[in-house]
Image (spheres, helix red, strand yellow):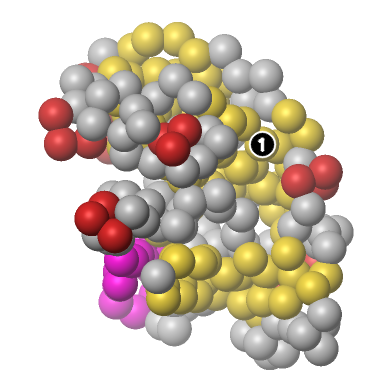
Amino acid sequence: MKGITNMLVFALILSGCNQNDPANDQRKIKPCTMPVSDTLKNNKPGKVVSEGDSLIVLDDSLFSDMKLVFHEISGNEFQSYKRRYKANCVLDAGHFISGSGLFVRNDCNEICETYLVEKTTNRKMLIPSAYDAGILNMLLSQTCTQFMVCSSYDGPDFEDYYENRAELYLFKILKETGLKGVKPAGQFYTKDWSIEDFTWVSDKAIALKVYEGNGSDANYRYLKTHL
């Protein structure tokens, strides 16, 4: 988080996400302290919500459904992928991705939202998430040509509050600056498990740390899939 960092993606920490009180019959939310990583540039934004054209909200129809097939891996393999991960991106001293004209902004007020913001215009794109706690993690691929966003609910009672237990969104990064450089690519939903963590294996594969019970007493599994 200091100065110019080569070959590394700066990790922001999502903070301020609230955990609602179940006694008030509100949604239970896992405290939001997961890492969020910077970097962006992509194409054709989705629906523009009229706020002087300042806010872009992406419609689900812009994302193709990813038919992901997951294979079990070991915890050691997952940690090895995490250690080897690094992205070919340059961050400047202000934590902007060099040449992209974008930065990440997190807003939490009962519901947490994450935006990509154009530095010069302050125009912003809402990163999709179905959960009150907002996105769990956003991470660039090694070549900085795409990024993955994951969100999740932390318990098997997710159907009391949400349609799915976890979701993944894939974006392509084009050689254009600002929000024109960000193109929605793929989406995946599951009711089978929650996501604790994930990392890129290569530009064509990711690995995940998941659990099926509650977050507090989870027995973790480790999965790998090709995109």
Q: Is residue 6 visible?
A: no
Query: From the image, which quarter does the C terminus lie in?
Result: top right
Camera-side residue: 65 or 181?
A: 65
User: What amino acid type is highlighted by mark number 1?
Assistant: Gln
User: Could you tell me residue 21's position as x and y percent?
Assistant: 25, 59
From the viewer's perspective, tell me whether residue 29 is left or right of residue 111. left
User: Could you tell me residue 176's position as x and y percent?
Assistant: 78, 66
Q: Quadrant of residue 210?
A: top left
Query: Does residue 163 lie above or below 129 as drawn?
Result: above
Work out which residue is located at the far left of the displayed protein and give it: 217
Q: Is residue 50 visible?
A: yes
The residue shown at (55%, 44%) is 148
From the viewer's perspective, tell me whether residue 2 is left or right of residue 55. left
- Magenta-span inclusion, residue 153: no
User: Could you tell me residue 72's position as x and y percent?
Assistant: 37, 10
Work out which residue is located at the far front of the displayed protein and give it: 24
In the image, the segment drawn in magenta is 1-18
Q: Which residue is mark 1?
A: 187
Crowd class of label 1 (few under 14; some 14 to 19; many from 20; radius 10 Å) = many
From the viewer's perspective, tell me whether residue 13 is left or right of residue 131. left
Q: Secondary structure at mark 1?
A: strand
The residue shown at (56%, 36%) is 163
User: Majority secondary structure of the magenta segment?
Assistant: loop
Query: Does residue 147 lie above or below 115 as drawn?
Result: above
Camera-side residue: 145 or 75?
A: 75
Camera-side residue: 111 or 194?
A: 111
Q: Quadrant of residue 196?
A: top left
Q: Quadrant of residue 194?
A: top left
- Magenta-span inclusion, residue 17: yes
